[in-house]
Amino acid sequence: MGPKVSNAPQYAGSVPGNIQDFWKPTRARSSQVSNEANRCSDPSIKQDVASPIPLPAGLPAYHASELGPWCAVISYDACVRLCLKYYFLGGRDGREARVFLENECSLLQTAFCLEQNLLQPEEELLSKRASESVVHEVIKKPQKTFGKLKVQVKKVKMSLDGPNGCTFSSIKKPPVLKLQRVNRRLSTMKSTVYSEWEALKRVRGAPKFSSNGSLSHQSMAYLQYGTLYLRDMAGLLKVGITSLHNASTPPEPAQETYLCSLRLKSSSDADMTRMQPGSCETHVFLPDGMTDDLIIEVTDSKGKYCGHVIAQMADIADDLGDKLRWWPIYREPEHEPVGRIQLNIHYSTGTDENNNVKCGIVAETIAYDSVLEAAMKAQNFKQRNLLLHGSWRWLVTKFATYYGVSDAYAKLRYLSYVMDVATPTADCLNVIHDLLSPVITGKMKGTLSSQENRMLVKLSDKIEETIALVFENYKSLDENSPSGLTDKPTPVSGFIAPALKPALKIYNLLHDIQSPEAQLQLCKYFQIAVRKILGRHLAETNELVCCSSEKSTVDEIVYPNAYQNMKSLCLNIRNEIISDTKINNQQVLPSFLELPNLSSCLYSSELCNRIRGFLISYPPISLSPPVTDLIITTCDFQKDLAYWNISPVKGGVDAKELFHIYITRLIHDKHLDLLESCKLDKCVGPQVSTSTFVDDMYKQLKETLCEFQVIISRWPEYTLDLEKVIADTERVIMETLEKKYNDILSPLKENTISVKAVQYVQRFAKGNSLPYSFPEELGTLFNSMKKMLDVRQPEIEKQFKSLSVCISQSENAVPGELLSEVTVMLRTKFRNYMQAAVEKLAGNTKLQNTTNLKKVIQEAKESVGESDIRNRMQCLKDILTKTINDLHGHLENHVFIIVCQALWDRMGQDVLRVLENRKENWTCKASRVAVDVLNETFRLEMQRLVGDKDVEAPRSILEVQSILCK
């Protein structure tokens, strides 16, 4: 073995250009190809990118095996000597070495592909030939090459050069193209000289001197004139020569382009290689002997045959190295020279150009690469099968130790093959970590060579791409997939993929995890993963935000489905954050990486934008179940983030901010709908005990409260807006009832005038007044108003009071204040209308003296007995009995009792006024009898009609009885 070469060539595999395609089957290309090689490796020559040669799926790119049989023989020899040594030492190493020495080292020969290069016993050769004669297929023999030929086409000229001497043969056929150039040039020069000569001829002049001057003066004048003339002529000649020199040559015809087809004499026409002259393209040919000449066929741009060239190998092989030479082009069958072609030919006799000449020195590292590749091929090294085992692992390890290959180089070279087939799986990443860890330790100690440092830099980029793939797909990793990734949506479970832990360990090896840059980069990887997951979820609702907002919103199928999809989006993103929280709680990620905060920041902001865009396209037209479900889900999402101690994000989900404008609009629309329902034309229906209109309106009010219960329970501040709607609606209900019963209420409104004014008017209208009859419609109105006060309003107030605890009271608004104002208004109106009706009914008793209670008491004499007074009270009693019966027919029991109590009290007030004005004994006697008659009448009738045995006397009756007892 020769000396160890520190700068041995490296054979790192190619890296896929796009990290997204990393998990796909690796494609690589050989550094050296045989007859298919078609590009020059000389960096001084411009090359086109060669088409990659695809490898079987999951296999690395092997490079050392392409160094030729000499390197394989040296490596084979080293392995044999190594095995022989350990075999004779015995022990476990001897048993491992015996495997490779059995059957004349056939295992090693096969692994290094040396069956055809090493001498074989005659017996084996004869047996192989006998077995091969049975096979009927024609097997192509391996082609033996005779050096390597690199060809580059520089120029093609289809016109011959001018004659070199004065021979008649050369003058006989001068080049037509060159004669045309000369003629055009001479014509241009002739025209230029002629124009300049004409300019010179136009120059005229004569010396100026006086007529009587002396001869010396005339001589000086001629001398001065001659000097000026020569100066002007010199200037004109200079301009002429300059213009002649700068005159452009007339445009020449466009040069023809040619195409050259190259092949070896031993090759067929199908193996031709086409090259463009001047394209700097280089092709490699492998001739099989000195008679395998290079044949070049030249055609023009239209494909017309122009001629051909035959470059004999004997001429080319005279001198090794680069040759730039002109070769004649002949046209057959005349064999007439029609042009020339300039070729740059490089000819070498070795099979490799990387200083690995046949029978040269092979470095230990290159031999190790050859042994390692042989072991990998023998054990089918590929994706998901990355470890050597058994005897081959022993051989590779002992080879590196025995021949001085450093441990760092051995691990880096092995790692290079692993990276060719690396996948984002736990088994692969664990292998990478185990190989990389001691190398990083050596780097920190400064024990790596320059070659090993270069290898580490190249491999670090590949490793970074692989672990980045893990981080960017931390929820899509699948150990059972060949690529390590899955395209199917994975269920959210909080399960940590096995590949994540070794990937983090590798990241710690490659980076200083304490540095802000490394921490920021790791966070960016996970942000990319979150965006991928988010994009997958958002894709399901993309069409919902792309729709026009002018579409019909009454589609009973599309509208609920759209809101259901948005609800599902919220739930899916919530589940993703829950999964991230579970992953974060398993203490696998670094402490600085708060995965829930990192992911929820993106999730929340993007979800907020998506919901906002969705609501623009699908604004809620009512608080239907799909709409309320989305509101509830959005609120719960926001509450969950706070419950999980996730910091709020600017621009994140704020349910109230998202739905505020739509809630306000819905409340406004509901207000308008309720007011529309309160219009007088809608107040129709049969006249029953309780107004159907009132019942229907309060039913709508209760439905409104139930409909907005979802909103009020989450945002109690909207209670005040709803209270305004309810209170305003109740006022309009009362106004509508007053408009409907305006004719009935008009007579009652007269009693708003003062009592003295009423008595004054009645005095003039006496004799013309008609008794007041309590109408049935008035009873319906009283029943409705009383039901509103006693039943409907308390139900609504109770709901508002249950929510008023959550409302922050302001200076301008107190919860329930508006409803209380409506209640006061209704009670006032009910009391006023009832008192007016009672006043009307009491007025009926004053239309005649026989029924006027005051007259009856005042006209009673002291001598009149109690029976006489009762007889005189009979007419009044009859009127009151009839009135009570009429009231009972129009009023509900509780309203009937209230009105009767008011009428009873009103009659007692008349008795009280008589006692206050006159206190004679006979007046008291008559008043006592009158009060007894009133009490008997009202009690008996009310008990008979209502069944209430405990009827209490009104306040005025009690005062009268108190006065009479004194």
Image (cartoon, rainbow, N blue to C red):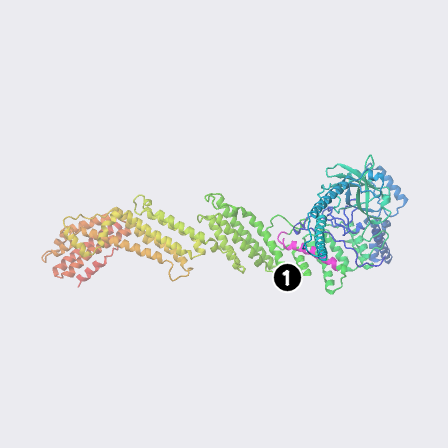
**Residue ID at (38%, 62%):** 811
The residue at the far front in this view is 212
Residue 32 lies, with reference to residue 917, above or below; the image says: above
**Residue ID at (42%, 51%):** 665
Specify whether 660 is left or right of 842. Answer: right
Measured as percent of width and height from the top left, residue 574 is found at 54, 54
In this rendered view, identify the residue nearer to me: 368 or 911.
368
Specify whether 171 is left or right of 188. Answer: right
The quadrant holding residue 509 is bottom right
Most frequent secondary structure within the magenta stretch? helix
The residue at the far left in this view is 863
Residue 467 on the magenta span:
yes
The residue at the far bottom in this view is 445
Residue 698 lies, with reference to residue 301, above or below; the image says: below
- The residue where tag 1 is placed is 517
The image quadrant where one finds the N terminus is bottom right
Can residue 18 be seen from the camera position used here? Answer: yes
| Crowd band around label 1 with a 10 angstrom C-alpha radius: few (<14), some (14–19), many (20+) | few
The quadrant holding residue 139 is top right
The local secondary structure at tag 1 comes to: helix
Specify whether 172 is left or right of 806. Answer: right
> Which amino acid type corresponds to the residue marked 1 in the rendered image?
Glu
Magenta stretch bounds: 453-476
